[in-house]
Amino acid sequence: MEKILVSRCLLGHPVRYDGGAHGPFGWLQRWQAEGRVVALCPEVAGGLPTPRPAAEIPGGQGAEVLAGRVPVRTIDGSDVTAAFVRGAGLALQLVAAEGIRYAVLKARSPSCGNHENYDGSFSGRKVKGEGVTAAALRQAGVRVFNEDQLEALAALLQQADD
Ligand code: SF4
């Protein structure tokens, strides 16, 4: 049975930067009951507290952060790149240890977003891009979905389990 790495905040854990959480999501509850879910909050695992200042990637490209070309900055200007990269590294360790090929990560997060991100101006402007952990997982061959794409993942899992 395929396991799935899931953003902890999507499972109702209050680990968002503002202390909030998301859900419940029916598919995630079902996959949890099946024992498939491996939960991770890359930012907390990387050493950041909750609550914490909002952070964005200038340009919105997590791969640029992993390549060392762009930092992750908080709204008050602190450089939190090291914690974000550490969290991405822990996600990679986890998927390798558990043989995970699929992830469900929170949309539009500077760690977890899989196809859209804020642009670093803290103005609400979005760009095509991905978070630091999402980029690391994609580069490692993990298929990354978000909470709006659960039906698509459910269809894939059905095939994978057959
Ligand atoms: Fe943690 Fe990712 Fe959720 Fe942000 S989006 S709170 S980094 S799990």
Image (spheres, helix red, strand yellow):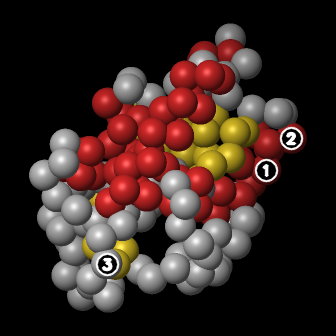
Q: Residue at x 32, y 85 (%)?
A: 75
Where 14 falls versus 142 (above or below)? below
Q: Which residue is mark 2?
A: 33
Q: What secondary structure is marked by label 1?
A: helix
Amino acid type, residue under disc 2 in the picture: Ala
Q: At 28% from the left edge and 65% from the top edge, which residue is drawn?
A: 72
Vertical position of residue 145 compared to residue 110: above or below:
above
Q: Which residue is at the front of the view, 7 or 42?
A: 42
Q: Residues within 10 Å of mark 1 (few under 14, many from 20)?
A: some
Dot label at residue 139: none
**What residue type is disc 1 on?**
Gln
Residue 118 horizontal/vertical position (percent): 27, 71
Is the C-beta separation of discs 2 and 1 under 8 Å? Answer: yes
Furthest-top residue in this view: 162
Q: Of tags 3 and 1, which is closer to the observer?
A: 3
Q: Position of residue 117 (x, y in %)?
A: 29, 64
Q: How much space separates mark 3 and mark 2, taking CA atoms?
A: 39 Å
- Residue displayed at 31% across by 30% down: 139
Where the C terminus falls, by quadrant?
A: top right
The secondary element bearing badge 3 is classed as loop
